[in-house]
Amino acid sequence: VLLAGWLLSGGLIVARATQVQVAQRATWRLQAQQQHRTSEELPAPRGTVVDRGGFELASSREVFRVSVAPREIGDREEVTRLLIGTLGLDEIVVREATNPSKAWRVLPGTHPPSVRDALINVRGIYPESEYSRFYPHGELGAGLLGVVRDGKAHGGIEQWFNGSLRGTVGRAVLQRDAAGREIPGEKFLSIEPRKGGRVILTLDVDLQEIGSEALARSVRETEARGGDLVITDPRTGDILAMVSIHDGSMNALSAINTPYEPGSTLKPLTVAGLLQHGLATLSDSVDTGSGSWTVNSRTISDVYPEGGVMTVSHALEISSNVGVAKAAQVMEPAIQYQNLRDFGLGVQTGVELPGEGSGTLRRPEDWSKQSAVSLAIGYEVSVTPIQMAMAYGVFANGGQLMAPRLVKEIQDSEGQILHRFQSRRVRQVVSPRVTRQISDVLVNAVEDGTGTRARLSTFAVAGKSGTSRAWSNGGYQDGEYFSSFVGFFPAVDPQLLVLVKLDRPKGAYYGGATAAPVTRATMEAILASQRTVLDRRALARVARSQELDEPVTSRPQGEALSPSFAALDGGGMTPNNSPVRVPWSPEEDIVEVTVPDVRGLSARAAVRRMHELGFRVRSDGSGLVTDLVPDAGSTVILGDTVYLISMSPERDE
């Protein structure tokens, strides 16, 4: 009986074991598969950033990493030679990677899609796709654009619009072995990744390049620590170029985040406030004495004291500290404060970039006895370059403070518009009449005052220079200065505004001597550019009206054409397709010159070079110059037209 019981129990156990093995085998198998099956994210192609004309500033390119499963390789020597030849890797690295003692190795570096095509059918070799961020123009606009490292956006547009650019990740299902290692060839797409959107900037890549070259050259020549350059369309607030250099790098963004005391560039804001509130007129007299004035135990002096009685207009034109400070005495602190606040000082502009500074504008209750006088001439207040550019835009557009616009629109990956950014008027600061009055004085400041080195031969420029002592570690630094100039052109119906600020230049440090020439060089280069945002027809009308007022009838023998005149001739057509002509004196001798060889230069650089040498220019493209008509080395008459044949770069439509 006992034996029968044991046999019965044993039979039940065997039956139960069999039931478990057979009936639940499928369940266990599924659980085992699930334990070794995982999913991973597939990165999405990041969206593109383009300038206002569709030229790419940042994009993503598909690249490949190559992994090796050595134990799957057939002919090891043949595969090793193939990898060395295809990837350009060191033989030692490849042989170590194909050593069968290793189950899985990832080769160093990323490679173009051609690598995938060459290796895709090789047993044991697995090219895997990923995306690398590419900046076609290198360091150009680096601080403004930001950067993507290891999939993370840092700074600039990349960070601010990361949500629009990053796209939507996909997913892949893959198998892992008992040790948790991925099983080669067992990866399957589950969810397709979706590419990020397209951010269209107001930036113009040509103007960005022009500004970068001009600022870098000035920083180098003046041995400054760095500097900023901002180009805007004052009518809309569009930022057309923004360059910041610090310690030799263009990765800075001090144009929006590093305030400085503006010095004399603030004086037009002070005088505009006096005019707007009916507290003074430009013809009012102010006694500057000997060019020095002591008030509340502080002595204010003029750099170049003219002294005596002068009008408010003249005081602003020659940048008299004493004259402007005395004129501003009639302004109540509350009005003086609100006037500067209305121009946008002391608050962020709202530019679409991370880390914007607001500068400093203290309320009247926090002022000292010297504050009102200091503020009138640009001290005890700090501004960012972008704030100052927007403030001067008020004088160029009839009195409106515009918000800066850096982004025009955001599109999805299919080109559908997701959001369009409109130009935004913040407020009417002063009347159009006041802006005309201030603009006229600023023209005089460029023609005969402190800004003569910003003067163009073709168009009247309105602008003002400024110099202020550099502040660091809680006090002013002896012998260190910020030099700046803000100007717009043409003075009538302005199209562009340029601000230049240099950080601690050595040697000559006054804004009129250092920053003003950079402004002029920038304006001349813009005028010489073949592809530009300028309205050439409107410029031609202005040029013709100015020629009627002050005709140009001749120029000295052999003297090169002014780049600004030549640009109108070679850079764009006037109504009826007639080029603007610089009159030549019939008495001038014919001068024969040799056509220079500008092949290999960009069209813009070549046009500028030819203009400097006195040639009229026509260009058929915007890439690298490949040929000239007449040929380089030919003898022609100075002033003849040379045709540049260029190889244009690809452009997004």
Image (tube, rainbow, N blue to C red):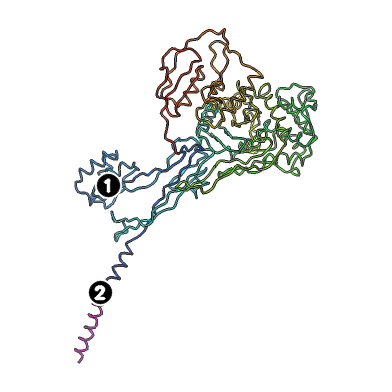
Looking at the image, tell me whether mark 2 or mark 1 is earlier in sequence order: 2
The three-letter code of the residue at mark 1 reads: Ile
For the point 79% across and 22% down, the residue is 308
Q: Secondary structure at mark 1?
A: loop
Q: Is residue 134 above or below residue 4?
A: above
The image position of residue 110, as x and y in percent, is 35, 43
Q: Is residue 90 above or below residue 18?
A: above
Disc 2 versus disc 1: nearer the observer: 1
- Residue range highlighted in magenta: 1-20
- Taking the magenta stretch, the answer to whether it contains residue 14 is yes
615 to the left or right of 307? left
**SS assignment for the magenta stretch, majority:** helix
Residue under label 1, please give it.
Answer: 120
Q: How far apart are labels 2 and 1 at the CA level?
A: 42 Å
Amino acid identity at mark 2: Gln
Q: Residues within 10 Å of mark 2 (few under 14, many from 20)?
A: few
Whole-percent x and y of residue 29?
A: 28, 68
> Is residue 215 rendered to the left or right of residue 646?
right
Residue 505, by quadrant, is top right
Classify mark 2: helix, strand or loop: helix
Dot label at residue 21: 2
Among the 4 quarters of the image, the one containing residue 35: bottom left
Q: Quadrant of the C terminus?
A: top left
Is residue 480 visible to us here? no
529 relative position to 64: left or right: right
- Residue 322 screen position, x and y as percent: 75, 28
**Residue 557 drawn above or below residue 71:** above
Disc number for residue 465: none
Say whether residue 19 is left or right of residue 548: left
The image position of residue 529, as x and y in percent, is: 51, 27
Q: Nearer the viewer, residue 165 or 549?
A: 549
